[in-house]
Amino acid sequence: MDMFNNLGRCNNCGYNHDKTYCPEEYGGCGLSSPHLSWYGEFDQGLSELNIIRG
């Protein structure tokens, strides 16, 4: 599943994932962080529009 295709929403069940893992095997840090943080300031705008929990 591509977590960035649907802003962290599962294509199969519709669950909204709050966190996304940064895989070490691809040079990442190996930690999980809030999914929408990966989009920078984008999450603030979505929160203001009540599209996400903020």
Image: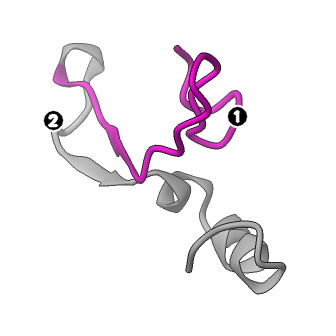
Is 39 drawn above or below residue 24 in the view shown? below
Nearest the viewer among 43 and 15 is 15
Percent x, y of residue 28: 26, 32
Percent x, y of residue 51: 76, 67
Task: State the extent of the magenta-drawn residues as a range.
Answer: 1-24
**Residue at 70% across, 27% down:** 5
Residue picked out by circle 1: 6
Q: Secondary structure at mark 2?
A: loop
**Residue at 56% across, 80% down:** 54
Q: How is the image coloured?
A: one colour
**Residue at 69% across, 78% down:** 47
**Residue at 70% across, 34% down:** 6
Number of marks in the rendered image: 2
Nearest the viewer among 6 and 28 is 6
Amino acid under label 2? Gly
Quick check: 33 left or right of 39?
A: left
| Tag shown at residue 19 | none
Label 2–label 1 contact, CB within 8 A: no
For the residues labelled 2 and 1, the Cα–Cα distance comes to 22 Å
Percent x, y of residue 41: 66, 72
Is 35 drawn above or below residue 45 in the view shown? above
> Which of label 2 and label 1 is nearer to you?
1
Is 1 drawn above or below residue 3 in the view shown? above
- Crowd tier of the residue under label 1, counting other residues whose Cα lies within 10 Å: few below 14, some 14–19, many 20 or above: few
